[in-house]
Image (cartoon, rainbow, N blue to C red):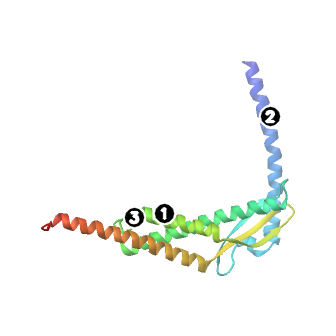
Amino acid sequence: MKKKIALIMTLLVLGACSSNTSKDENKKTDTTILKTYNNGPTWIRTPEKEGYTTELGMVEIGNQGIPMAREKAVASARVALSRQVEIKIEALIENYKLAVGTRGDVVGEGTFSDVSRQVSKQTLNGSKQLDMFIDDKMVYILVGIPNKTLVKSIKSNMKEEIKGNSEEAFKRLDDSIEKKFPTEKN
């Protein structure tokens, strides 16, 4: 029993020592980020560019150097950009459903998630690096996609999905009407 207690105490002490090291490293990184935030380009504080939907990617420069950190920052920003676009599309869809009173009859839930996924995928493909800043420890990348491109993509995807599902809904309606009011078969 005493051996178990001694082992647990040793593990706790070692765990505490190792966590202090990472806290110090985190403080240094946080200080670097804060310095860059205050003294770096304004797009780091407010990742915006007129006419674009944008996101910021930032990655600590590791052993593999700046090229790998840049790649990771771009990837991180693109994923965040895709999520941002997806959220905005979902909000548009909810507003559309409220405006037309859709309860899934004409346009199903799957339609909207298909549109959202398709536009998000196109966002990832159509996004590009707009700016980059490197300090002592971090790479900062501003990634964006032109709003004109997004608007065109959203409109075309929504129109196609709604049109396709409307035709299907009208066919179901016709079938229902014919079942309720059977006609003579020739």
Q: Quadrant of residue 127?
A: bottom right
185 to the left or right of 141: left
Q: Quadrant of residue 149?
A: bottom right
Q: Nearer the viewer, mark 3 or mark 2?
A: 3
- In the depicted view, which residue is nearer to us: 122 or 12? 122
How crowded pointer 1 is (Cα within 10 Å; few <14, some 14-19, many 20+) is rated as some
How crowded pointer 2 is (Cα within 10 Å; few <14, some 14-19, many 20+) is rated as few
As measured in the structure, the alpha-carbon distance from the residue carrying label 3 to the one carrying label 2 is 57 Å
70 to the left or right of 89: right
Name the N-terminal-most of marks 1 and 2: 2
26 to the left or right of 175: right
Above or below: residue 18 compared with residue 98: above
Name the N-terminal-most of marks 3 and 1: 3
Residue 99's mark? none
Q: At 85% across and 58% down in the image, what residue appears?
A: 65
Residue 13's mark? 2
Amino acid type, label 2: Val
2 to the left or right of 101: right
Residue 101 drawn at (x, y percent)? 36, 72
What residue did someone put label 3 on? Answer: 108
Above or below: residue 17 compared with residue 160: above
Q: At 61% across and 69% down in the image, what residue appears?
A: 123
Give the structural element (helix, strand or loop) at label 2. Answer: helix
Amino acid type, label 1: Ser
What residue did someone put label 1 on? Answer: 113
